[in-house]
Amino acid sequence: MILDELRAKARSEPPKGEHVASLVIDDDDAAEAALEGALAYLGADRSRRTLRLVIEGAEVGYLDRSDLYTSVTLRTKSPGDSAHAGLPGPPRYRTIRLRCPIEGCPDSPILTATYDEENPRTCPAHPGTVLELET
């Protein structure tokens, strides 16, 4: 559901003169965590305004900061909501930042919620080049 909404919001034209990080989402289960990480990434620097969107291995287009804000559902709390409160602690997913080892790669960093050490991701801009985990 979230993936279809993001696909519909994506624009085909890249921003002019702006370095754009990639948001990679493998499936609907990882979408919410990836969106949270993307919002944190954009929020850390006001000059970051756009992300390249890759869903299930296919480049979809570009999302602006405002597109991501409208994809997050906010709701107010009311009396009785605590009876259905979530469990404390961090969510199961966390955003992982990957970087291409080739200097100046236009696709770095790559934000994702999943990573498999036995089958690491490769750079979309440099096929065959294994992405590195950022620390």
Image (cartoon, grey):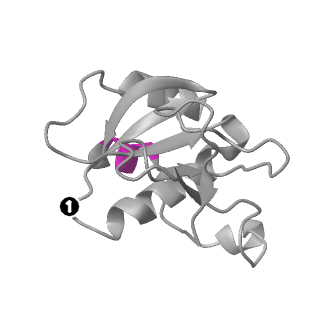
Residue 35 among magenta residues: no
Task: Say which of 1 and 101 sits in front.
Answer: 101
Whether residue 74 is visible to the viewer of this picture, yes or no, is no
Residue 12 is situated, as x and y percent measured from the top left of the image, at: 30, 21
Residue 14 is situated, as x and y percent measured from the top left of the image, at: 25, 30
16 left or right of 81? left
42 left or right of 78? left
Q: How many numbered badges does the structure rendering display?
A: 1
Whether residue 88 is visible to the viewer of this picture, yes or no, is yes
Q: Residue furthest right?
A: 118
Residue at 66 percent across and 63 percent down: it is 94
Task: Say which of 72 and 97 sits in front.
Answer: 97
Residue 120 in the image: above or below residue 2: below
Question: Splitting the image into 4 quarters, where does residue 130 fall?
Answer: top right
The magenta span reads 67-71
Residue at 27 percent across and 57 percent down: it is 48
Name the residue beneath numbered marker 1.
Answer: 47
Residue at 75 percent across and 65 percent down: it is 84
Amino acid type at mark 1: Ser
SS assignment for the magenta stretch, majority: helix
Residue at 49 percent across and 44 percent down: it is 23
Image quadrant in which the N terminus is located: top right
Question: Splitting the image into 4 quarters, where does residue 119 fall?
Answer: top right
Residue 59 in the image: above or below residue 113: above
41 left or right of 66? right
Residue 68 among magenta residues: yes
Residue 9 is situated, as x and y percent measured from the top left of the image, at: 36, 28
